[in-house]
């Protein structure tokens, strides 16, 4: 039995279909200023609904949840533990919160879901025979540990003036610009790392662990081989080269750590009060990568590198055909 919600025909199963993916106007030619402004400040867009939340969280984290920089001049268990358990708390709040709503409470059933099935409770390819427990183990032991290690070493380097330190008083404009463009760098970095991980040897021995998750859920996002975690979080190293402030590094690594929960949610929209579906950003983009493997290597297509390098899938039948043709050519050339 189907119903109409804010113009969408949906039911508890599979009648709903997501819209085709379009390229953000930031990188479309000719440039269209009105569309760019709408994308930057509209909803959904560059800042809303996700990036503005990560930016606000980074501000709160720096001012209230990070040890004093002077105390980080030498390594000790006290301040390192603060950062680790703060990150762990964020992980359980964000990853666990999305999982609780969509897969335990099942608050909106399968409405606006990409998955044919929920994350598999029992399957022998997962540790403990359970997808969620498997994903949690890799996320916590590998993901949170390596995330925290990168952050701790970077904070220590800032505290000891070993890397360039940007001062707000001397460069407020660059300070703000850098804060606002970090999502662009993160998306491009993810594309490069992701393409490397799909090289046959690395895919077989490293990245295949992540792709065990076909029907994805929030905890699938950071369920990776530790070597993949090392590459995935390595984007923070740009702050060892580019003049920046610790708050920029926190925004960078924190968004990198938390974004995969939403990126692997398996749902396109949040159904509010059974009436208003609220977009969660471009969730379909990465879902298609898990479905077809050989497309959409970027994070969400903010920087359209997949389009530039011929691996873009917009969700259409035409894109499906191109994927099949590419696979045939790969088999012939193997």
Image (tube, helix red, strand yellow):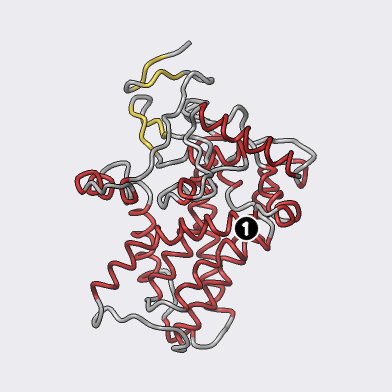
User: In terms of depth relative to the viewer, which is nearer, 306 or 93?
Assistant: 306
User: In terms of depth relative to the viewer, which is nearer, 118 or 316?
Assistant: 316
56 to the left or right of 83 = left
Looking at this rendering, what residue extends furthest in the right direction?
Answer: 124
Q: Residue at x 48, y 65 (%)?
A: 253
Looking at this rendering, what residue extends furthest in the left direction?
Answer: 34
Give the answer, above or below, for where 280 lies relative to 148. above
Number of dots carrying numbers: 1
Where residue 191 appears, as percent x and y from the top left, is 52, 55
Where residue 288 appears, as percent x and y from the top left, is 55, 37
Where residue 232 appears, as percent x and y from the top left, is 57, 61
Q: In which quadrant will I find the C terminus?
A: top right
On the image, numbered disc 1 is attached to which residue?
196
Looking at this rendering, what residue extends furthest in the top direction?
Answer: 1
Q: Residue at x 61, y 37 (%)?
A: 292
Q: Residue at x 56, y 84 (%)?
A: 75
Q: Residue at x 56, y 73 (%)?
A: 81
User: In terms of depth relative to the viewer, which is nearer, 27 or 209?
Assistant: 27
Where residue 23 appears, as percent x and y from the top left, is 38, 42
- Circle 1 SS class: helix
106 to the left or right of 41 = right
Give the answer, above or below, for where 79 lies relative to 53. below
């Amino acid at each position: 039995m189907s119903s109409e919600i804010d113009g969408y025909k949906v039911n508890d199963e599979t009648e709903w279909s997501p819209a085709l993916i379009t390229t953000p106007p930031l990188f479309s030619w000719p440039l269209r200023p009105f569309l760019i402004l709408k994308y930057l400040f509209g909803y959904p867009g560059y800042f809303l609904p996700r990036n503005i939340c990560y930016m606000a969280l980074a501000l709160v984290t720096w001012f209230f949840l990070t040890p004093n920089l002077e105390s980080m001049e030498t390594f000790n268990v006290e301040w390192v533990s603060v950062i680790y358990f703060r990150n762990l708390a964020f992980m359980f709040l964000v990853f666990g919160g999305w999982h609780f709503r969509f897969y335990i409470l099942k608050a909106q059933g399968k409405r606006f879901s990409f998955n044919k099935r929920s994350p598999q409770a029992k399957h022998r390819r997962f540790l403990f025979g359970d997808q969620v427990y498997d994903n949690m183990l890799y996320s916590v032991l590998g993901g949170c540990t390596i995330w925290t290690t990168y952050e701790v070493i970077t904070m220590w380097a800032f505290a000891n003036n070993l890397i360039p330190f940007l001062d707000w008083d001397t460069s407020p404009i660059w300070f703000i610009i850098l804060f606002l463009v970090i999502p662009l760098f993160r998306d491009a970095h993810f594309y490069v790392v992701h393409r490397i991980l799909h090289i046959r040897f690395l895919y077989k021995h490293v990245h295949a662990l992540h792709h065990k998750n076909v029907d994805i859920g929030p905890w699938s996002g950071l369920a990776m081989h530790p070597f993949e975690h090392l590459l995935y979080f390595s984007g923070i190293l740009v702050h060892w080269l580019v003049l920046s402030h610790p708050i920029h590094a926190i925004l960078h690594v924190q968004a990198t750590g938390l974004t995969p929960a939403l990126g692997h949610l398996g749902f396109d929209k949040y159904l509010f009060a059974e009436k208003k579906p609220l977009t969660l950003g471009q969730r379909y983009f990465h879902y298609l990568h898990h479905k077809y493997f050989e497309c959409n290597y970027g994070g969400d297509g903010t920087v359209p590198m997949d389009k530039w390098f011929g691996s873009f899938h917009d969700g259409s039948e035409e894109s499906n055909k191109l994927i099949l043709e590419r696979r045939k050519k790969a088999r012939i050339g193997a």
